[in-house]
Image: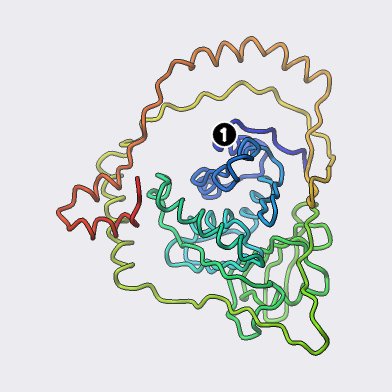
Amino acid sequence: MGGAVSAGEDNDDLIDNLKEAQYIRTDKVEQAFRAIDRGDYYLDDYRDNAYKDLAWKHGNIHLSAPCIYSEVMEALKLQPGLSFLNLGSGTGYLSTMVGLIIGPFGVNHGVELHKDVVEYAREKLDDFIKNSNSFDKFEICEPVFVVGNCLEISTDSHQYDRIYCGAGVQKDHENYMKVLLKIGGILVMPIEDQLTQITRTGQCSWESKNILAVSFAPLVQQSRADGEKPDAVQLPPVTVRSLQDLSRIYIRRTLRELSAEESPDKGLKVPQKRKRRRCRRRRINTYVFVGNQLIPQTVESEEEEQTEEEHKEVEEEEERDIGDIEILKQVNVLRDQIMALPLPESLKAYLLYYREK
């Protein structure tokens, strides 16, 4: 594939660049990426690097490069109601985006080796639900995370429609991963330095397709004393939603649909951000190692640098044109409608997922 995308100024800018580079190709994937700010999953001291197309690691916390996540989301071919398993779920960033697409009647499970990272993922999910206005634009299948080794999942575990493994898989573990997949399901994982899409076409048949050259840290295999049996990882149960939860889903859906019918543009009061003019860069097929991942790298020619210099004055003028525009606070229509209902405050709080904003 081509070179990495250029760094963005913010999350929307990063997504624009991923679209331009054809890493993001479908509307539903774009919407999920825009809804969840990648910077929110960084520690505060490192947030300035959130919108670069690079992987990030701090201690046990790890995020893959945006172009990798884009290819994974596209390759999974997500649809509402599907079941999803994230092996090496990390911060929960990918799992939460998946949840926005598969919706409230899907299944969204994650297995992560490190307990501190699972706690971090739960905190980030809670923060997204309670503080992000984007949350109210979707119906989410909230991810459920468990602590455990991905290579020690109980043999009687249920199967999934979609699976992603976020660590390098050895060839002798390939069949182990395939067994967790339903017939007709899709598994995306890095194997032998290739991000690979595997579709289960029958009881004993699969089709494989290489997506992107990558380099991931391998899955951790815990060492044990001779004869010691590992503790099997029990995946979360697949549960039926409660009547209360179903009521909340359908009330919120009805209010959202009514507001869209009454005023499609209501609440969209943020002036569209004017993109700075970009010169088309020629891509050179080269990759560099960053940490444990192989990342595509953009290389520019002197001719293109000269072209960018010619446009510099025009770009500065465009920035001056929009510098004094006052950005109005976006209205959360769904929240306003719920607050206006003649209901007890406790019920309103439940309908709002106990949101803080």
Position in image of residue 325 (x %, y %): 42, 18
Quadrant housing residue 245: bottom left
Which residue is at the front of the view, 78 or 14?
Answer: 14
Q: Circle 1 — which element?
A: loop
| 255 relative to 230, above or below | above
Residue pictured at 67% horizontal, 13% vertical: 311
Quarter assignment of residue 11:
top right
Which quadrant of the figure contains the C terminus? top left
Give the x, y percent position of residue 249.
33, 61
Q: Residues within 10 Å of mark 1 (few under 14, many from 20)?
A: some
Residue at (57, 53) in percent of width and height: 93
In the displayed structure, does residue 156 sit left or right of residue 206? left
Q: Residue at x 68, y 68 (%)?
A: 199
Q: Residue at x 62, y 33 (%)?
A: 8
The answer to whether 150 appears left or right of 146 in the picture is right
Q: Look at the image and tell me in which quarter the N terminus lies.
A: top right
Per the image, the residue denoted by label 1 is 10
Residue situated furthest bottom in the rendering: 227
Where's residue 84, x and y in %? 56, 67
Q: Position of residue 115 (x, y in %)?
A: 61, 66
Q: Of the residues shown, which amino acid type is indicated by label 1?
A: Asp
Q: On screen, 280 above or below 198?
A: above
